[in-house]
Amino acid sequence: MVKMVDSALFLLFLTGWIIGVRGQFNVQVQVGVEGSFYTPGTVSAGMNDVVTFVFGGDFHDVTQSSFENPCVPLPGGFSSGFAGRGADFSNPTPVWNLQITNVSGPLWFFCAATEPTFHCASGMVGAINPPSQEVYSSFVAAAKNTSPTATVAVSYVPNGVGAFATSSPAPVSSSVATTSPASSASNESHILGPAEKQPSQNFTPSHPVQR
Ligand SMILES: [Cu+2]
């Protein structure tokens, strides 16, 4: 059993190595869980890494902006559009994967939600690869200079400057729920990880490992 898991892990490693020598890493940002903020507010990401925004709170969004204008959408920038669990937190948690394609400079973003006031103006901003925490702090300070009654219209825009998404925010389960529901036994297999799914054969992933 241990040997089987070992070989499965080895193949997973091998797949990652084929995708790129460095591999693809994933970093998570919680959206609106600790008040109207991104947690953490800054992340570092390498080329082709994926920043996963987890919309575990009320409705928020992630819209690309610039250092100079923290609360104004960057022309050509990405936007998740509004997503979240709703005011009563009754909906499943949407997640949004943003792949980074330019690491030569920082990517800035803000939340365009306006209830009860403009989130960006209360400091709901974030940065990928900021030059320093000091520069990020001045970005936050500039955001807080924005009028709390400002409004910005946003909608889902997958392609940004230095990053892109392949789909709008959605609960993780819905993205794999395209297969027709079968017996309860097959539902059970969805709970199991890949290593448990195929215990006897050689584990050969049919697609790149991506989370
Ligand atoms: Cu917000």
Image (tube, rainbow, N blue to C red):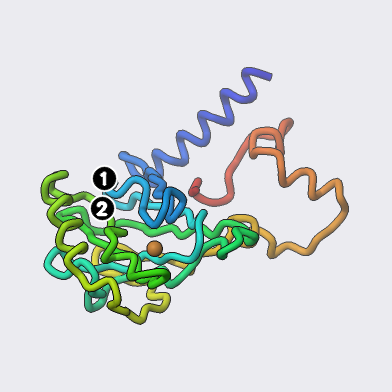
Question: How dense is the environment of label 1, judged by Cα within 10 Å: few (below 14), some, or many (20 and up)?
Answer: some
Relative horizontal placement of residue 147, taking residue 13 as reference (left or right): left
Label 2 belongs to which residue? 128
Marks 1 and 2, the one that precedes in the sequence:
1
Question: What secondary structure is found at the residue carrying circle 1?
Answer: loop
Image position, residue 196 (x, y; %): 70, 33
Question: What secondary structure is found at the residue carrying circle 2?
Answer: strand
Give the quadrant of residue 73.
Answer: bottom left
Give the camera-side residue of 17 and 68: 68
> In this picture, is 131 found above or below 155?
above
Give the quadrant of residue 126.
Answer: bottom left
Relative horizontal placement of residue 51, taking residue 207 as reference (left or right): left
Give the camera-side residue of 186 and 206: 186
Q: Please tell me which residue is depicted at 36% across the width and 57% down the height of the picture.
A: 99
Given contact means CB atoms under 8 Å apart, are the residues at marks 1 and 2 in contact?
Answer: yes
Q: Please tell me which residue is depicted at 57% across the width and 56% down the height of the picture.
A: 93
Q: Quadrant of ligand 1?
A: bottom left
Q: Amino acid at mark 2?
A: Ile
Image position, residue 184 (x, y; %): 86, 50
Q: Quadrant of the N terminus?
A: top right
Give the camera-side residue of 16 and 35: 35
Answer yes or no: disc 1 within 8 Å of ligand 1.
no
Q: Please tell me which residue is depicted at 35% across the width and 70% down the height of the picture.
A: 117
Label 1 belongs to which residue? 44
- Disc 1 to disc 2, how far (Cα)? 6 Å
Give the camera-side residue of 57 and 207: 57
Image position, residue 60 (x, y; %): 43, 65
Question: How dense is the environment of label 2, judged by Cα within 10 Å: few (below 14), some, or many (20 and up)?
Answer: many
Image position, residue 27 (x, y; %): 38, 45
Q: Please tell me which residue is depicted at 33% across the width and 70% down the height of the picture.
A: 118
Give the number of marks.
2
Q: Amino acid at mark 1?
A: Ser
